[in-house]
Amino acid sequence: MVVRWQVLPLRPMSLDPLQSVLASAVQAAFTHHFSKELDVKLIGFQQTRPEFEGDVTINVFPFLKLSGKGPEQTAQAIGEHLVANVPVVVRFNVVKGFLNLVIADTYWLEFLGNGESDHLSFPSTGKKVMVEYSSPNTNKPLHLGHLRNNFLGHSVSRILQTAGNEVVRVQVINDRGIHICKSMVAWQKFGNGETPESSGTKGDKLVGKYYVEFDREMKRQIEGSITSGRSKEEAEKEVPILLEAQAMLLKWEANDPEVRALWEKMNGWVYEGFNSTYTRMGVEFDKLYYESQTYVLGKNDVLEGLKKGVFYEKDGAVWVDNTPEGLDEKVLLRRDGTSVYMTQDIGTAIKRFEEYPGLSKLIYTVGNEQDYHFKVLFLILKKLGFSWADELFHLSYGMVDLPTGKMKSREGTVVDADELMEEVVNEARASGEQLSKLDEFSEEEKTALFEMIGLAALKYYLLKVDPKKRMLFDPAASIDLQGHTGPFIQYTYARIRSLLRKAGTMGTWSHEYMVTWPLLPEERNIIKLLHQFPGVLAESAARLDPSSIANHAYEVVKAYNTFYQSIPVMKEEDVSKRAFRIILSAAVATNTKKAMWCLGIEVPERM
RNA sequence: GGCCCCGUAGCUCAGCGGAUAGAGCACGUGCCUUCUAAGCUCGUGGUCGCAGGUUCGAUUCCUGCCGGGGUCGCCA
């Protein structure tokens, strides 16, 4: 397995046990035939292509310099040695420089036999990791971009947890600042005392409405003052409503009781709204930080840095010079002594490591438009001499584009998170009702099922793509329930569960199976895929990338469906074959449930 | 302009040093007296942005160019 970059080191445990056996055998074979030491790093394993016989393929091209023989000869020699000395290697064939190995059925069966308990549980790493995600502003509702952020952060937390880490999930709620003051001013001016209760509007939506209202009024005022002869610059600087918002921010900082009360009230509305959105999304947090409490942090750290000569003073402001590292200079404390965004981030990071002394990693799930910010932040903390500065990681994900272009909140082209979830669930309902397979379901059961399916569609759609990459959100594809989708995986799971229920009542459950027949290719493919799971999970954890798990889960169920379509399970008359296929099916179900759990997606018993 | 990221089938994405580059959608085809057809089968479809370089071997690594995006505030 090749991991180009990794955040958490891979543990040897997670390496494929078959590969480690083969690797040392290949080394032994090489020494035996060519009297030279072969570096393990040269041994690359890959899946044998379906057009050739074999399970595992070793490419011998890298060995040729050492062996001094041609590719066929080298491969032949190693192949013969493996068959003679490694019990699980039963046959081999050589195609060009590729040594295709056939692994014994007994190996796959043994893996399947104790695999369920073994390969799905990872030993503890003893490490504690903090994952920050979500971190919204409180002046407007959550949108599509937040969904990618939340699903990603939540999934990464679960993947890290599954891989044996203790995970602390946190977010910083940006509850103070000019943005919320804008909503507050607009509400005071135009709200007429409107509340979520009085208007039947969700709290975050209501506050967002006044944020938009503010913007509208501001534009009106600017235009008005331009018509009455002011220059554009003048008009923009002196627009009365903005001055009011700025004045309110100052009052807030001065702890003005009235302003604080309004702020508490409106933020309270927002939290109520957010909570219902988070609940529906199915994401959780262990600890919430509020910017109103953290924004004062960092100042002393910066001043200390100044004393130590890490920073310098210019024009009354405190600066850091990152030009030696190829970056720029950056202000950390304004001339008036107040903080900038970077200052609080410095302080918050320090505080977190104080609160969680054993923390071995701090991961920030934040969009890639802040790549530069985090580069600078991490560098500053390093310059301040914190040993943990190397353990900071920016999980930088790409933006979500719409077919119509970029989302712009001011232009009303944002996709609202609540609306999107509603839509996707409605679509699941529409398709589900049409299939009329759910006659035995009560209304409540149906509602729960459609909720599960709709959210699976949305989550899987957003998680199957490499997080680093910008992605296009196609509304039609996101509610698709067929093909490479979450619901397709759920469907396969439900199918298997149905099968297993039947198996239970028919009393054919038995782990005491004897296999005296060769595995069918369809069966073999499934086991091989299940066998890869630990490696996929380890890679996913190392790279903080749910997409590899998402794609692997899809491959597994696809292989299962192919099997299911053409090979009888319950209808198989041979008792031991039947038992084996039931166990195989159960293993797929267990694996699927686990993989989907890592993605934050639930799976239904029936659908 | 400096720095960073991305260009793979009509569309959305996998693959990231190795064999004739894979999925899904879309399009065409066949399969429900059989364990859930939200499924399966077969087919159509690609100068892996372009040009060099490194290598036995490059979609994958390096350089340049073209195209798209992001970012460079005493904003957050």
Image: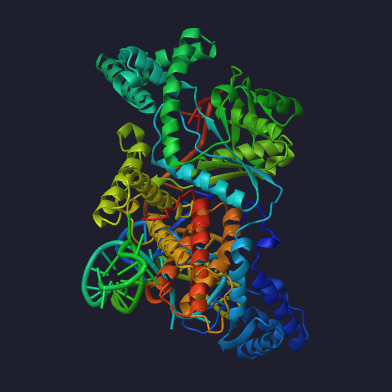
The quarter in which the C terminus of chain A is drawn is bottom left
Q: From what the image shows, is residue A547 above or below residue A332?
A: below
* Residue at the spot 40% in from the left edge and 52% down from the top edge: A461
Closest to the observer, A427 or A111: A111
* Residue at the spot 67% in from the left edge and 24% down from the top edge: A313
Q: From what the image shows, is residue A17 above or below residue A330?
A: below
Closest to the observer, A470 or A265: A265
Outermost residue, top direction? A257
Q: Where is residue A123 in the image (x, y as percent from the top left)?
A: 68, 55
* Display coloring: rainbow
The quarter in which the N terminus of chain A is drawn is bottom right
Residue A49 is left or right of residue A414, and the answer is right
Specify whether residue A404 is in view.
Answer: yes
Specify whether residue A237 is in view.
Answer: no
Closest to the observer, A137 or A498: A498
Residue A298 is left or right of residue A423, and the answer is right
* Residue at the spot 62% in from the left edge and 86% down from the top edge: A90
